[in-house]
Image (tube, rainbow, N blue to C red):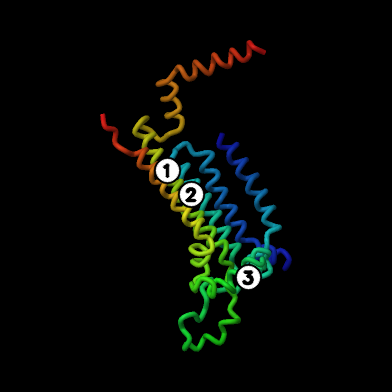
Amino acid sequence: MSGVIDIVYAEYNYWIYVTLMMIGFYAMIAKKNLIKKVIGANIFQTAIFLFYVSLADITDGTAPIIVGHGAEHAEHVEHAADVIYTNPVPHCLILTAIVVAVSTTAVALALIIRIYNEYGSLDEDVILAARRELQPEFSEHARQKGVAEVSEQ
Amino acid sequence: MKTLALFVVVITGAMLIYAGHDLPAFGDINSPAYQAPMTQYFIEKSLPESGVPNIVTALLASYRGYDTLGETAVIFTAGMAVMLLLRRRET
C-alpha cells in the first residue's frame, strides 16, 4: 500500500499535465469553432510549460537566484554555500517557448479575423461549405483529376 | 466523430502516463537533468562569469544571447504576418 502512495507522490504532477494536455488535444480535434481550436492549442502548450517547470523542481530547492549576493552584511550569508537551487536550464528554455507560443497565437488569431471577414462564420463546416459553393471549379478539378488517375491505371 | 476523438485522446493520455512512469520523481535531486555537468556548471559559475545573480537571466541573456537575439526575429516575423493579414485594402 505504501508503494502505491510513493508512486502517486512521485508522479502525480505528470498525471495532471497529461490530463491538461489531453483536454487541449481534444479541443483541437473535436471542436468545430476555430477560436476554440486556438484555445485548445494554448491549453496544450501550457501543459508542456508546466511539465518542463516541474521537471526543474528540486525538493527544498529555492529559486535560481544566488543567495547573499549584494547583501554581505546580512546574517544569512554564512548559509549561502548550503543552498540548493532548482534547475535553471528548463526555466530558460520555457521562457523561449512562451515567446514562440505568443507569436503563433497572434498569427492564428489574425488569420481567424480574416477568415471571419471573408466567410462571416467561425464554424469549420460552414466555411468549408461556403468554399465549395464559391469555388466549384476546385472540387470539379479534383474529381476529374481522380478520374484521370483511375483511367491511367 | 466525437467518439473517435475521445478514443484517440484517451489512448494518447494512457500512453503518456505509462511513459511518465520512467521519468524522475517529482522534486528528485538525483534526476539526470539536475546532475548533468552543464547544470552544475551554470549554478556555480554564472555569477563569477557574467556578474548576474539571477541564473536564469545569466543563461538567457549571456550564455544564450544569440538564441534570444533570434527570438526577436520570431517576434518580428509574427508581427509582420499580423500586419500583412490585418491591413486595410486600398481599393
Q: Mark 2: which amino acid?
A: Asn
> Where's the N terminus of chain B, which quadrant?
top right
* Of the image marks 2 and 1, the number of the one nearer the N terminus: 2
Quarter of the picture holding the C terminus of chain B: top left
Q: CA distance from mark 2 to mark 3?
A: 33 Å
Which residue is more in the foreground, A118 or B38?
A: B38
Q: Residue under mark 3: which chain is it in?
A: B
Closer mark to the observer between disc 2 and disc 1:
1
Q: Which mark is residue A42?
A: 2
Q: Is residue B71 above or below residue A139?
A: below
Does dot 3 land on a helix, a strand or a loop? helix
Q: Position of residue B60 (x, y in %)?
A: 50, 62
Q: Are marks 1 and 3 on the same chain?
A: no
Which residue is situated farthest in the top direction here?
A151
Residue sitting at the far left: B91
Q: Are marks 2 and 1 in contact (CB under 8 Å)?
A: no
**Secondary structure type for disc 1:** helix
State the separation of the CA atoms marked 2 and 1. 13 Å
Query: Which mark, residue B40?
Result: 3
Number of marks in the rendered image:
3
Of all chains, the one bearing label 2 is A
Vertical placement of residue B1 versus A8, above or below:
above
Could you tell me which residue is drawn at 47 percent across and 20 percent down? A138
Which mark lies nearer to you, 1 or 3? Answer: 3
According to the picture, the residue beneath numbered tag 1 turns out to be: A107
Residues at marks 1 and 3 touching, judged by CB atoms closer than 8 Å: no
Q: Which residue is pictured at 54% across the width and 39% down the height?
A: A29
The quadrant holding residue A137 is: top left
Q: Position of residue A49 (x, y in %)?
A: 53, 56
